[in-house]
Image (cartoon, rainbow, N blue to C red):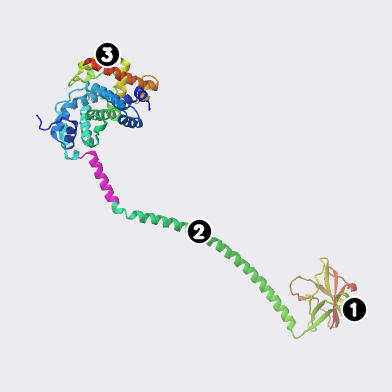
Amino acid sequence: MNIKQYIESGMIEACLTGSASLEDMRELEVLRQKHPEIRIAAEEVQKTLDNYAAMHAIHPPKDLKDKIWTRLSDPKEQETTSQKVEKAVKLESTQTARLMWLKPVAAVAVILLIVSLIMNAYFWQRSNSFSNKITTLEQKITENKDYYTKQIAKNGKSLDIILSANMKQVVLEGVDNHKADAGLVYWNASSKEVYLSLQDLPMPPADKQYQLWAIVDGKPVDAGVYKKIEGSSNLQKMKSVSSKVEKFAVTLENKGGSNTPDLSALYVAGEI
Amino acid sequence: MSIFNFNTEEDLVLGLNHKDREAFNYLYDNYASSLYGVIIKIIGSQDEVVNDLLQETFVKIYSHIDQYDPEKGRLYTWMLNIARNTAIDYARSRKFKQRHNNIKLGNLDSTISSENLSNDFPVDHIGLESVTERLEKKYKSIIDLLYFKGYTHQQVSEILDIPLGTVKTRLRKALELLKKEMNKTK
């Protein structure tokens, strides 16, 4: 560094009058020890200041000396600042020393607390989603239950019908082009109830429906249309027929049925 | 005559460390008036508070003596700075300002206020006067503002209405001239 420049800048004078920053004063301390020129320059400036201060000297009042000595020799004043600070630090450290064992324990406790809070949040969220799932499942089960109950009831009914002693089973065989097809009629002569199952027949086009005919005295009598539902066993109750029925036949008619059978669309038929 | 020999500053400091009465006597007899004079210069008058401030200075000297580092300078310099700072702190405090609304802190020329001539003129008041007479006002004022009043360079540049950089160079010039004048008086 440029020593001459430093000296001529007036930094030394600024530091020694206490008007420079702490940084600058610290720097001067370092430079004084490093460079003899700076040390000498600083000593000169300091001497000037010290002497100038001494020129202002005024005798204090005579009694002040003893007063000051009394104050200084007061046992309370006996300790130097450093000693007082030392005492305070020691006191503080014994107080904290007693509780030192708490420190690591406290730290661990805090960590555990945080971990447990995180886990709580996680599990709560999981539990929430679980109960949501459960509710959904319960609903589904109820729906299924209702459905199956109905199905079973239906099936139960069908079974009852079939197994009734008064029921007569009439097999409807396929005719002409429909040799592979077959249907089933259950007929109760006394109650005149008729049940039809066309399980094995193909699904009709959307605008057509199967219709059951009862042949009475050689003439066909409408016994109702059949609603074919894909995939379910279908024993449907048809219209009641006269006990004099000789034959049953099924044709494919337009949706809603027709008054007279379309004999070209005859699928299956069977004699009592 | 004291038993103890305080030929070296080291001995003196040792004595102070041990709260020795003789050491205190030596210290007080040789330096108290310098410290007292500086305090008065800063406060602006020989107000009764200056006695308390001198006492405070000695209390601080004693309680901080173990922090004094001979490497950093003379004991006298160290004590002077304690006295200066004690007085400057008080001068800036509200207490002082409340009691002394009338005193202009910018009163640069007086060493003792005429309203309170009690004890003494400066011991070397003739010498002081001769030096300050010969020093140009602008140089005298910059030393007073920075060294005795403890203003910052920024504040001084505002008070004297000069650029910030000029403060430093003018202070250096002032102390150079002061040194010359003081050497002349010798």
- Mark 3 nearby-residue class (10 Å; few <14, some 14–19, many ≥20): few
Q: Is residue A142 left or right of residue A181?
A: left
SS at mark 2 in the image: helix
Q: Which mark is residue A122?
A: 2
Which residue is denoted by mark 3 in the rendering?
B134
Q: Percent position (x, y) of residue A80? A: 22, 39
Magenta residues? A79-96
Q: Percent position (x, y) of residue A215? A: 87, 79
Q: Is residue B16 visible?
A: yes
Q: Nearer the viewer, residue B55 or B177?
A: B177
Residue A83 highlighted magenta (yes or no): yes
Q: Amino acid at mark 3?
A: Arg
Q: Is residue B90 left or right of residue A192?
A: left
Which residue is denoted by mark 1 in the rendering?
A219
- Mark 2 nearby-residue class (10 Å; few <14, some 14–19, many ≥20): few
Query: Do tag 3 and tag 1 residues touch (Cβ < 8 Å)?
Result: no
Q: Which mark is residue A103?
A: none
